[in-house]
Image (cartoon, coloured by chain):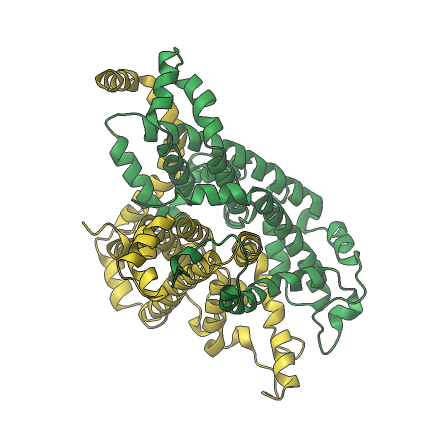
Chain colours: A yellow, B green
């Protein structure tokens, strides 16, 4: 025992370790850490991308929270609504589907899991053409044509241009593609729970499937639940480009589908107010981080 | 009372008690699969069916015309469609191979070695799972500009290599390899590199397959890089070309071409996943955040 310990320590130090780490962590530093630090730095400046940034203190943050009506009235509520429905909604959906899939035998499970997972492979822009056809605003759009045929409506609805519908469509489309990596992790987590654990629990007086999920399944796969939660949070905040893709304009009609990622693009790449855009970025990253922290609290180790 | 309920997880065969799950799962699967079935049908519709009113879901007289139109079409600067497709294929392959190399190397050391920064690096990579690249698109632009990567082939590759979820999954998987195996190799006089090649890599094939899929999907579907960091048409990718089709307005004739392009976007993802799905499930069993 002692010998192998010593061996390990002796064998650990040196340049070899460094050489193995450097390719990944160099890219990590350059393309993740540095941009995040730069965003934090820029958020305290005025910067139009031409002149050197000038220090502005908290001005950007103050303006963002007090002056920017579009942000406070549309973008922030939209982002919260979108991510609170798509994040936990997609997450709960993924868990329930994974759990049900675990209750059926191997072959049909594989086929059904593949179908459930396939929308997430197409994530993003690739499918927006499909949705624009389905929700197209003229009578040729599939949904409109269907609704007219069954006389629910007489005039086609401009789904993608209408402030009332755009957000709901964004949510449906995002939920549709929400069963991704997190879903696979949870499915595999459920399948790997030792059967003896269940047997023991039933002997100890567990009486129904619901108790089984609460007392055995979820606690036994906490790590996968947490991984799934982080993936769901990230997916919910990342999916924001869908509104612009669907409506074809940034800002979206009456800002109905405007999320924080769009607001960043709007200020950064369209208006060149980089400092301000950076402040929104920092706020967005903080929001994602705190959401994930909540998930960690819910599913992390309880000790 | 011997019908023990807990045994129903991962059953070997069909039993009528499973019917209730099928009753929920099958309609849901239809809802999830329908848009994809639709894309398949739409891509093969001849022009009169695309225009048909009321619109029909299934194709009646399938044709390759939309694909022919797609391949013949040229974009701004007369870049042929095949060029975008070629770029996508090359970029995706290079990203997949390099991602696997850098992530497995770092994953091996993070999992099996003791050194001072180990805990901090692991922790920061786990936090970076939450990183959303589009949130810091602007500072990323400045970094990439400073490095002289704008309008180069490498801008497709290098940022993609920093893939926290890839390293995370690989490291979790290597954690399962017992230390004794490495110690035995050390006794035989193997050095770091030999252990990495001969012991680690063969044992983590499922994790490699999974990371390959994720890296492929992320790269193959990526529009942002071609859009933001490249303004030379001949270096842009198929996903970008696809997105220009989608926003070029909703002319019905363009729909068929767009659907054909969507199908080309989707098929490689699907095929690769079907081939590697078993490996993916093996990897996901170890995906937990502890």
Residue in the image at 23% along x and 27% along y: B116
Residue A18, percent from left and from top: 33, 23
Residue A52 visible in the picture: no
Residue A16, percent from left and from top: 35, 18
Residue in the image at 57% along x and 38% along y: B91
Q: Is residue A175 above or below residue A149?
A: above
Residue in the image at 37% along x and 41% along y: A32
Of B289 and A235, the residue lying toward us: B289
Name the quarter where the N terminus of chain A is drawn.
top left
Q: Quadrant of residue B166?
A: top left
Q: On the picture, is A267 further left or further right than A65?
A: right
Q: Is residue A165 above or below residue A126?
A: below
Residue B136, percent from left and from top: 38, 49
Q: Is residue B6 above or below residue B159?
A: below
> In the image as oriented, which residue stretches furthest toward the top?
B189
Of A184 and A256, the residue lying toward us: A184
Residue B102 visible in the picture: yes
Residue A168, percent from left and from top: 46, 73
Q: On the picture, is A71 further left or further right than B45?
A: left
Q: On the picture, is B123 further left or further right than A100?
A: left
> In the image as oriented, which residue stretches furthest toward the left?
A303
The total of numbered circles placed on residues is 0
């Amino acid at each position: 025992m002692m010998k192998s310990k010593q061996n390990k320590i002796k064998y650990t130090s040196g340049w070899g370790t460094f050489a193995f780490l450097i390719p990944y962590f160099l890219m990590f530093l350059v393309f993740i850490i540095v941009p995040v630090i730069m965003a934090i730095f820029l958020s305290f400046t005025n910067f139009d991308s031409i002149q050197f940034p000038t220090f502005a203190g908290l001005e950007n943050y103050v303006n963002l929270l007090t002056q920017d009506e579009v942000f406070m009235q549309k973008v922030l509520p939209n982002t919260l609504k979108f991510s609170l429905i798509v994040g936990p909604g997609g997450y709960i959906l993924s868990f329930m589907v994974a759990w049900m899939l675990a209750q059926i035998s191997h072959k049909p499970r594989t086929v059904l899991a593949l179908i459930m997972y396939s929308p997430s492979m197409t994530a993003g822009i690739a499918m927006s053409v499909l949705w624009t056809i389905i929700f197209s605003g003229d009578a040729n759009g599939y949904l409109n044509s269907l609704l007219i045929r069954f006389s629910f409506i007489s005039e086609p609805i401009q789904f993608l241009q209408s402030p009332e519908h755009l957000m709901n469509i964004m949510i449906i489309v995002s939920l549709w593609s929400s069963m991704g990596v997190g879903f696979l992790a949870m499915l595999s987590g459920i399948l790997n729970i030792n059967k003896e654990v269940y047997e023991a629990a039933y002997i100890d007086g567990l009486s129904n499937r619901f108790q089984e999920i609460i007392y055995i399944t979820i606690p036994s796969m906490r790590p996968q639940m947490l991984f799934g939660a982080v993936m769901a949070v990230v997916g919910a905040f990342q999916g924001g480009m869908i509104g612009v893709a669907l409506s074809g304009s940034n800002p979206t009609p009456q800002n109905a589908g405007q999320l924080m990622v769009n607001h960043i693009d709007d200020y950064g790449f369209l208006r060149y107010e980089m400092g301000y855009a950076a402040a929104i970025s920092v706020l967005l990253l903080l929001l994602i981080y705190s959401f994930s922290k909540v998930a960690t609290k819910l599913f992390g180790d309880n000790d | 009372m011997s019908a023990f309920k807990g045994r129903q997880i991962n059953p070997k065969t069909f039993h009528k008690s499973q019917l209730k799950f099928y009753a929920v799962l099958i309609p849901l699967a239809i809802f999830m699969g329908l848009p994809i079935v639709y894309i398949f049908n739409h891509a093969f519709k001849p022009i009169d069916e695309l225009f048909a009113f009321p619109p029909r879901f299934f194709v009646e007289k399938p044709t390759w015309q939309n694909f022919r139109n797609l391949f013949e079409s040229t974009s701004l600067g007369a870049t042929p469609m095949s060029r975008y497709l070629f770029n996508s294929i090359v970029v995706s392959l290079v990203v997949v191979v390099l991602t696997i190399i850098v992530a497995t190397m770092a994953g091996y050391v993070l999992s099996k070695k003791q050194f001072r920064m180990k805990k901090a690096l692991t922790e920061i990579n786990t936090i970076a799972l939450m990183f959303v690249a589009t949130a810091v698109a602007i500072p990323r632009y400045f970094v990439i500009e400073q490095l002289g990567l704008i309008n180069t082939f490498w801008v497709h590759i290098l940022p993609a290599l920093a893939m926290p979820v890839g390293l995370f999954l690989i490291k979790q998987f290597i954690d399962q390899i017992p230390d004794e195996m490495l110690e035995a190799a050390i006794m035989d006089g193997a050095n770091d590199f030999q252990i990495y090649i001969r012991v680690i890599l063969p044992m983590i094939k499922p994790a490699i397959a999974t990371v390959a899929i994720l890296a492929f999907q992320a790269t193959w579907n990526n529009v942002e890089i071609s859009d933001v960091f490249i303004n030379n048409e001949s270096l842009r990718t198929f996903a970008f070309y696809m997105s220009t089709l989608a926003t070029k307005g909703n002319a019905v004739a363009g729909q068929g071409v767009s659907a054909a392009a969507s199908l080309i976007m989707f098929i490689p993802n699907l095929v690769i996943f079907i081939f590697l799905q078993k490996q993916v499930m093996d990897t996901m069993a170890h995906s937990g955040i502890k």
